[in-house]
Image (cartoon, coloured by chain):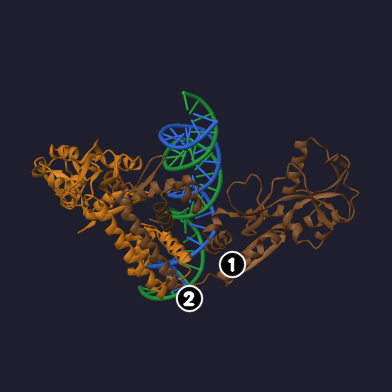
Chain colours: A orange, B brown, C green, D blue
Amino acid sequence: MDMEELKLFRHLAESLHFGRTSRACHVTPSALTRTIQRIEAEVGERLFDRDNRSVRLTTAGEALKQYAEETIERWKALKNSLANSTALHGDISLYCSVTAAYGILPAILGRFRKACPEVQIKLQTGDAAQGLTRLRNGEVEVIIDALPDKPPAGLEFMPLTETPLVFIAPLDFPEPVVYEGQEIDWRKTPVIMAEQGLSRERLDRWFATKKILPNIYAQVAGNEAIIAMVSLGCGVGVVPLLVLEKSPLQEQITVLAISPELAPFSLGICTVKKNLRNPKILAFWEIAGSR
Amino acid sequence: MDMEELKLFRHLAESLHFGRTSRACHVTPSALTRTIQRIEAEVGERLFDRDNRSVRLTTAGEALKQYAEETIERWKALKNSLANSTALHGDISLYCSVTAAYGILPAILGRFRKACPEVQIKLQTGDAAQGLTRLRNGEVEVIIDALPDKPPAGLEFMPLTETPLVFIAPLDFPEPVVYEGQEIDWRKTPVIMAEQGLSRERLDRWFATKKILPNIYAQVAGNEAIIAMVSLGCGVGVVPLLVLEKSPLQEQITVLAISPELAPFSLGICTVKKNLRNPKILAFWEIAGSR
DNA sequence: TCCAATTGTTGCAGTTTTTGCAATACAATA
DNA sequence: TATTGTATTGCAAAAACTGCAACAATTGGA
């Protein structure tokens, strides 16, 4: 009988719902099912009466639930009494795209600082695309970033906020935007695009849906660069609204009303599942997720 | 934190001796060391001050020891309260050579019956050589047998008793035994040997040490057969004293004083280590070992 | 003083256990 | 009837654990 198993069991005994428990505890439903089966085998007694539609505790389950609660509590107490400083300490490494840094990092960091003042945060910012590889290489423990459309396997994601992906045009130089009636004439209007990344993918798909071959004026790296070029009148661009709002150049930029809108950016936090067993990272994760 | 780990820790916290604990709990010293290291890592604190010569509990160790005792106790209580019949039940399968059946089986079985009346014992007897293979194939859970000279890997052995391996000769027919002065003339005296098995190996080696090529009269299977043939005057033989004592033919047999004596048979109990996690088998094991 | 025996630890490889993904089975709902 | 939500399972990959053998440190005698 193992601590982790006990915690899973306890949560399930509360929620009575495999799916919810597996999500809450960062395990796949499969692993949860098997854990319960394992415990049942060890105890030699069925703990939950369950079919595909409902989950109920058996009396044996009730008994184990009480044991689990007591044991987990005692364990926590022991760990507390042992740790000279009961607080978490050490450091955790974050990687953060610039977009995310603007959007949500300050709030999270503030809350985390308050909750775990003794944990040092090693923050790196950089290109969004690098985050995932650094995560896999173990160079970094958590990344905060725009969530890709299809989440790579083995990673744990938590969306935190959304920000629209908006078309922007220069305010002071109206020339570049060429209209054709109500609509923008994309064949003539120069577009500044991200070199790569999620917003580029979104934009490519948007043009593809419209069956338009855009007039690409430049491909640049970084949302700030896009904003800068747009503000200089080079053409229109696409950036997350969040970045625009924080930009010192926003005064010189206007947001275009385009339909259909681009799907919004979902900003969130991501790590490899295994990291969540590290109490510091788990704390960070949960603080990030709170409100 | 796992039950098995806790039990190991508790035992070590009592014995303060890695070797003894590892033997008592049926783990290799290596596994024990690692278990302790694992717990220490999980707790984040050294539990034992140890060098190659002494082992002492740290204060953290003291605290964990108390936790361990309480938790194990609660767990036992829980299991008790759950099991409708608190007693072990089900069945366990034994394989037993005829030699062992005479020697030690009755005593063990008697004690076990008393302790675990609800456990059915499925006993098979047969040739000693088959025991090990049946064990490996999982056809049988425990064997009781003469222990081989070099214990095969991965198996758990416990010697229980010894019985001398003795040379026997017919009482009523003195002819076969040919003396040459004080000594027996092995070149002329016919010998009845076991076809194979441990006593055969011992005997072969005995002759090899003496640099004698024995006059083999017959090779037979089974100690009873050897006794029978010897009693009929076919030659001398070698059997465990235990078997001889139980034989109805023992009146017609005499034990020869031969030097050097053959190494005695060590009778004991054997199983694959993994089986000892099965509570029924563990109970059997420990009852067999008691006194 | 040197050799042998004892004791806990560690590198490495083999084995067992656990996990995740994908597919499945079943019931409720639209 | 098709679709959605739920728990489970087969199978292969990953992780954890174990045993063996070698090792270092220490003790106790020859």
SS label for mark 1: helix
The tag earlier along the polypeptide, 1 or 2, is 2
**Above/below status of A183 relative to A215:** below
SS label for mark 2: loop
The residue closer to the viewer here, B188 or B145, is B188
Whether residue A149 is visible, yes or no, is: no
* Residue A84 point in image, percent of width and height: 23, 49
Q: Are marks 1 and 2 in contact (CB under 8 Å)?
A: no
Whether residue B211 is visible, yes or no, is: yes
Q: Please name the residue that numbered disc 2 is placed on.
A: B84
Badge number at residue B2: none
The image quadrant that residue A158 belongs to is bottom left
**Other residues around mark 2 within 10 Å, as few (<14) / some (14–19) / many (≥20):** few
Does residue B120 appear to the left or right of A169 in the view shown? right
* Residue A96 point in image, percent of width and height: 23, 43
What amino acid type is highlighted by mark number 1? Phe
Q: Quadrant location of the C terminus of chain B?
A: bottom right
**Above/below status of B157 relative to A91:** below
Badge number at residue B112: 1
The residue closer to the viewer here, B117 or A182, is B117
The number of callouts visible is 2
